[in-house]
Structures are given as C-alpha cells and as structure tokens.
Image (spheres, rainbow, N blue to C red):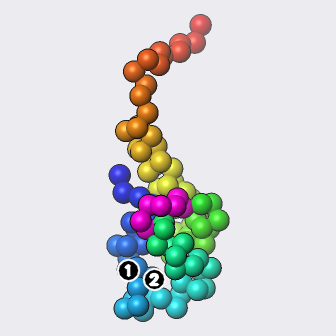
Amino acid sequence: MPHACRRIATRGHPASDRNPAKPALAQVGISRQHLYDILNERKPVSPEVAVRLGKAFGDGAGVWLWMQAAYDAWQAKRAVDVSNVKLIRAA
C-alpha cells in the first residue's frame, strides 16, 4: 500500500526545482522540508495538511485522510501480532 503522498509524486513533485508547480507550494502553506518528510514517509498526512492538499489538488481533504488511514492500517496489520486475540461474539 503506497503512502498517501505518493499521489503527489505521480502528479509531479511540487518541491522540485524543475517542476513548474514549485511556486504553488508556497501557496499551499507547506514547507519544502515538511513535504519531503511526508513523501519520504517520515511524517503522516495530518488533517491540516490534508485540507491544504485537498484544496490544492481539487479533490478534498477526505481523499488524503482516507489514503493516510488506509496506509496506517496496512502498516499496523503487518506489524501487530493478533494471534492471541479472540473474536468477541454478541450474546
């Protein structure tokens, strides 16, 4: 499962010096370092960043939050041992 900001990489990296979208990065309100940290999976897409990216790309914050949640769940499923967890059934 790709990290939520892989979508930015496929649309062109706005922090790249060769990218014509670079000036738009300042309008989004995300620093170049913050974006690099998200792209390199060192930081998650926070709700605040999701709102900004959703506005910038025209697809809404929900898309970015859903992608981040899906990535987080995928990572947790790989890392968490649930072999001793029993299914709870309603009475």
Mark 2 or mark 1: which is in front? 2
Under mark 2, the amino acid is Ala
Residue name at image x 42 percent, y 72 percent: 8
Percent of width and height locating residue 39: 43, 68
- Give 53 or 41, whichever is nearer the viewer: 41
Percent of width and height locating residue 64: 52, 61
Q: Which residue is situated farthest in the right direction here? A: 48
Residues shaded magenta: 39-45
Q: Inspect the magenta stretch and tell me whether residue 42 lies in it.
A: yes
Q: Residues within 10 Å of mark 1 (few under 14, many from 20)?
A: some
Under mark 1, the amino acid is Gly
Residue name at image x 53 percent, y 13 percent: 89
Percent of width and height locating residue 16: 41, 85
Dividing the image into 4 quarters, which one contains the C terminus? Answer: top right
Looking at the image, residue 43 lies above or below residue 79: below
Q: Which mark is residue 12?
A: 1
- Secondary structure mainly formed by the magenta segment: loop
Q: Which mark is residue 91?
A: none
Residue name at image x 58 percent, y 65 percent: 50
Q: Residues within 10 Å of mark 2 (few under 14, many from 20)?
A: many
Looking at the image, residue 81 lies above or below residue 18: above
Could you tell me which secondary element the residue under label 1 belongs to?
Answer: loop
Percent of width and height locating residue 37: 48, 68
Q: Which residue was labeled with disc 2?
A: 15
- Give 81 or 66, whichever is nearer the viewer: 81
Quarter of the view holding residue 12: bottom left
